[in-house]
Amino acid sequence: MNEIDGDETQVSTGTTGEATDAVAIPELVIISGMSGAGRSTAAKCLEDLGWFVVDNLPPALIPTMVDLGARSQGNVARIAVVVDVRGRRFFDNLRESLADLEAKHVKRRVLFLESSDDALVRRFESVRRPHPLQGDGRIVDGIAAERDLLRELRGDADLVIDTSSLNVHELRAKMDAQFAGDEEPELRATVMSFGYKYGLPVDADLVVDCRFLPNPHWVPELRPFTGLNDEVSSYVFHQPGAKEFLDRYTELLQLIAAGYRREGKRYVTIAVGCTGGKHRSVAMSEKLAARLAAEGVETVIVHRDMGRE
């Protein structure tokens, strides 16, 4: 995660010859994403965690808000700003504001809330409200326009959370896991098993395909179990290439993780897939997560599709 030099970054104010006051630069999170994907819930969660939250702030005013927080004598140590298409006439200024913050050595994180088109349509229809960009068209037209508008920001995001299948409580749990701690780890990883027949996870940074391994589904005594079962895991990792794949992919992740740290990316979601998300991907995810944890990476394991069959 982006840190401000261990939360010790300070600037000095005052004139030459006078005692200077140390001013701590606030931690900054920018919340954006698709309308209906849960921005308000994410903002409320940060507010409950003690963050100073500003909704729909024009991007050009973000540096000003950070400056005001720095002059608050520590009363505003963490700031979250919600930026969305309601302020679309100001949206083009966001990249300039982010560049301004970098020039001032203010490190920030961008949280992007994502969701599938189907989930967004259902949510807008359930509250009987139009999409803010649909105009005279349909809800799906507004969603498509918003995706296009936010494409670059999504690509630059430090953390993407897909809320398609999450309820409010599950989203809050994810927010708590990422933002509640006082000390941020250098890198956090989510290792997610999934089934290809249920679709690719839209919030994955890296995708691993385990379908090159024999499927335990076709072994009658293993079929009822999952990759969490010792017999299934042993079967998977006794197949030719399984251990070698785990070893080499772990080495590759070490290289990628070092690059992420250099680029200031502090979150990574690794999706491990097999046909149904029940056997091979689960077993491989568990081993991969254990390897990452042993390397000092704080790791969360999610088995997205286990139990769906």
Image (cartoon, helix red, strand yellow):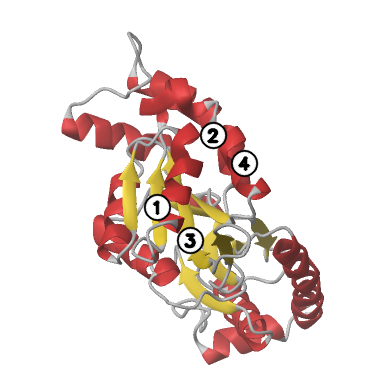
Q: Amino acid at mark 3?
A: Glu
Question: Front-most of 60 and 227?
Answer: 60
Q: Secondary structure at mark 2?
A: helix
Q: Report which residue position mark 4 lands on.
A: 100
Residue drawn at (41%, 61%), measured in percent from left and top? Answer: 78
**Pointers 1 and 3 in contact (C-beta within 8 Å):** no
Marked residue nearer the N-terminal end (2 or 3): 3
Q: Report which residue position mark 3 lands on.
A: 27
Residue 10 picture location, percent across and down = 56, 66
Q: Amino acid at mark 1?
A: Ala
Q: CA distance from mark 1 to mark 3?
A: 8 Å
Which quadrant is home to the C terminus? bottom left
**Pointers 1 and 4 in contact (C-beta within 8 Å):** no
Residue drawn at (54%, 58%), measured in percent from left and top? Answer: 14
Which numbered circle lies on residue 167? Answer: none
Residue 127 picture location, percent across and down = 17, 33
Which quadrant is home to the N terminus? bottom right
Question: Front-most of 202 and 172?
Answer: 172
Marked residue nearer the N-terminal end (4 or 2): 2
Marked residue nearer the N-terminal end (2 or 1): 1
| Marks 1, 4: nearer the viewer | 4
Marked residue nearer the N-terminal end (4 or 3): 3
Residue 218 picture location, percent across and down = 58, 72
Which numbered circle lies on residue 80? Answer: 1
Q: Residues within 10 Å of mark 2 (few under 14, many from 20)?
A: some
Height in image: 39 above or below 175?
A: above
Height in image: 206 above or below 68?
A: below
Residue drawn at (45%, 36%), measured in percent from left and top? Answer: 61
Height in image: 299 above or below 20?
A: below
Q: Report which residue position mark 2 lands on.
A: 94
